[in-house]
Amino acid sequence: MMKVGSKDSIWNKDHKKDGCQNCIDPVTAGQLKRIFTKTDMGVLETVASIYTKYMKELNMDTCWNKAHFFAQAVVESGLNMKLKNGESFNWYYQDLIDTFGKFQTEEGREKAKKWGRKIKNRKDPKAVDVTLENEINIANWAYMPDYKTGKSLGNKGGNDGWDFRGRGLLQLTGRGGYEYANTYTLKLGSDIINYPELAGTDISTAVLSSMAFWRWKGLNKISNGTTDVIGKICPQVGNNVKMKDKNGDDSSNYAEKQDVFKNITTKNFLIDVCKWGKENTASGQWHEPVDNPISTLYMQSGGSGKLGEHWGLFGNTRNGSVHQGLDLFAEPGSNVYSCVEGEVFEVKTHSGYGKTVTIKITDKEAFYNHRRDYKILYSSEGEIIQGLHFDKTKDIFLFYAHLRKVFVTKGQKVETGKIIASSGVSGVESGTCAPHLHFEIFTTVYAVGKGLNYRCNPGFYVHFKRASEQSVQERSLQKEISEKGKIEEVNGKD
């Protein structure tokens, strides 16, 4: 078992002692025992160590994320944190019809009556549970990819509905979610694509897959600063299920989660004194250049595959040709942010780059502290760590290109998270099937035209999702936009 604070702990190695200390403090078994009151301390020690080890990597290292995550988990998994090897499909037939669109077709209604339970109340002496064979039939039909629910889950048909049914602390569901989570659980030696039952039987895998699900749904960002559990958190986790509260009164799992968050987890994780937000623009903070940064998967021409996956990375990644920055997928009109405190050094239009903004960093500490242990993804295709003459002891500049509109002026001071522009495709005269923000980091006052010199790989600072980490929806959106054909932009309008 990994010990909290040991040398292999991501928390111990990467976290800096600034901002909110409670945010970056490790989760403890004692904290969890006050939430999961009937769970063995040995299990809670494992849960605490896994959360602590991966919370920074998954951007869940805030008091808010801890409080929201474990409020959801205790209602989903119970006070004894009892894992289940997959959600049950022992459904009353009419509930199947009322819940799943796939069962609302004429054929679906017939299958619901054939496979589902005939009597709603399972305590009725005449009630007969659904057989295992029919549970499998129900799961695969309900989550078929030719209907909205199955498609949104990234299922491909066959036995995906059953194989990738809800498991883990937060009921990870669907092939898409399992594929995303698998990029993390493989670090534990758990291949949940070929052995999906591990998410429901191994506690370490259950915790990490649920954390990956949290990030996949964007809850690591939604959680921060919000007390709205019912409106903002719960809908991303699952459906609102009616239930009885501890007094036997009518309630729902949404209401229970709100109650646990308000009365238990916020107190455990000290939300009232959390400094997140209060110091969000102070020294030492960083904001990604775009919301939900993901690498581009397509070339300007619309080509994709393995070549498209490294086309937008840093180095000689374009069949040996130089690419001087990192291309982050961004639909035209998306917000572009100042990553750290700085001063607008230049606002200029360049051939090939279009409208650009260059920011000179004034808070170098935020830049240094945000560096991560990024691993080069495509070294054999030319991706490198940095070019010649990159020297971060000198002035550091952030360069944003292909912008549609610029909202700042030369000499203006900008704080962390300031919206400085909207993304576009300016500078790409022939148009592009892959709209993106081109982002560079360099240490010379004018790097345009100098190849890879004075530049570093932005992947060491931008926590972007590479191709294998992107969800089915994220990949599908890039594909959909690419297939629409080239977007052209003239004078800031497309």
Image: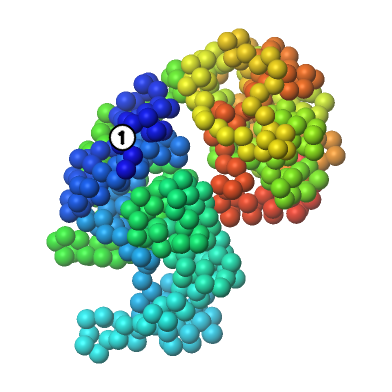
Q: Which image quadrant for residue 489?
A: top right
**Residue for point 22% across, 65% down:** 244
**Image location (x, y in percent) of residue 256:** 26, 55
Residue 248, compared with residue 230, is above or below; it is below
**Image location (x, y in percent) of residue 263:** 21, 44
Q: Is residue 408 visible?
A: no
Q: Amino acid at mark 1?
A: Val
Q: Which image quadrant for residue 199?
A: bottom left
Residue 62 left/right relative to 434: left
Residue 296, compared with residue 451, is above or below; it is below
Q: Tally the numbered discs.
A: 1
**Residue for point 61% across, 34% down:** 376
Circle 1 sits on which residue?
4
Decide: few, some or many residues near mark 1? Use Cα within 10 Å; few <14, some 14-19, many ≥20. many
**Image location (x, y in percent) of residue 303:** 78, 49
**Residue for point 52% across, 51% down:** 180
Q: Name the quarter where the N terminus is drawn.
A: top left
Which is more toward the observer, 429 or 386?
386
List the single residue furthest toward the top: 394
Residue 13 left/right relative to 468: left
